[in-house]
Amino acid sequence: MREYDLIVDWYASERDDQTGAAQAKAFASSVPPGSRILDGGCGNGIPITRALVEAGHHVIGLDSSSGMLERFRENCPGTPAVQGSIQSCPFAGSCFDGAVIWGAIFHLPPEEQIRTIGSMGRVLKAHAPFLFTSGDEDGFSATESTMNGVAFRYYSFSVENYRRILEEQGFSLNDVHTDEWKNTYYLARKR
């Protein structure tokens, strides 16, 4: 997203908390050590990629923002990252043991979210977990808010609609929960 290129420095200084790190660590413990994990919409790598790497996994970052990827390479040296979209994930089929998309899928219009879930289904191995964050109510028209003066759009499906979409894309929804910052986490597993 070009919007993230506009806030790279601000994001690095203002968004250095550990929001999502506990969920990433729990996710990391649900797969065998040394698993190959995709961090879709990896941003600058903090805290999600870093938590997965520290848990002993082989992580590959994917982000559309070149500026965020520059920071990712500084924050997570030795961890590969690719510029591309989560909607059309540029990896071979069935090559990942798990995938995380934290803080990214809700920026995509509904049809692009469905494409993204399908893309994750393509690159994940059978029975692999998929963790993502989004809203929990249908919001098919964009709502907007700003980060550092840059407008961002947000979309969502309801929990039941995410369940239906995940099922249609070959997943089972195993858990939904909300953290103290009102981030809703969806944990699915590829069938």
Image: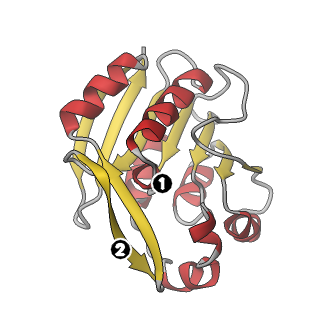
Q: Are marks 2 and 1 in contact (CB under 8 Å)?
A: no
**Where's residue 115, x and y in %?**
50, 32
**Where's residue 185, x and y in %?**
31, 47
Disc 1 marks a residue whose amino acid type is: Ala
- Residue sitting nearer the eye, 122 or 2: 2
Classify residue 75 as left or right of residue 107. Answer: right
Vertical order, 54 against 71 (above or below): above
Vertical order, 187 against 81 (above or below): above
In the image, which is nearer the foreground, mark 2 or mark 1? 2
Please say whether residue 73 is visible from this viewpoint: yes
Residue shown at 35% from the left, 36% from the top: 187
| SS category of the residue bearing label 2 | strand
Vertical order, 27 against 77 (above or below): above
Disc 2 marks a residue whose amino acid type is: Ser
C-alpha gap between disc 2 and disc 1: 14 Å
Query: Which of disc 1 and disc 2 is earlier in sequence?
Result: 1
- How packed mark 2 is, by other alpha carbons closer than 10 Å (few <14, some 14-19, many 20 or more), is few
Quadrant location of the C terminus in the rendered image: top left
Vertical order, 6 against 178 (above or below): below
- How packed mark 1 is, by other alpha carbons closer than 10 Å (few <14, some 14-19, many 20 or more), is many
- Residue sitting nearer the eye, 23 or 134: 134
Please say whether residue 18 is visible from this viewpoint: no
Q: Which residue is mark 1?
A: 104
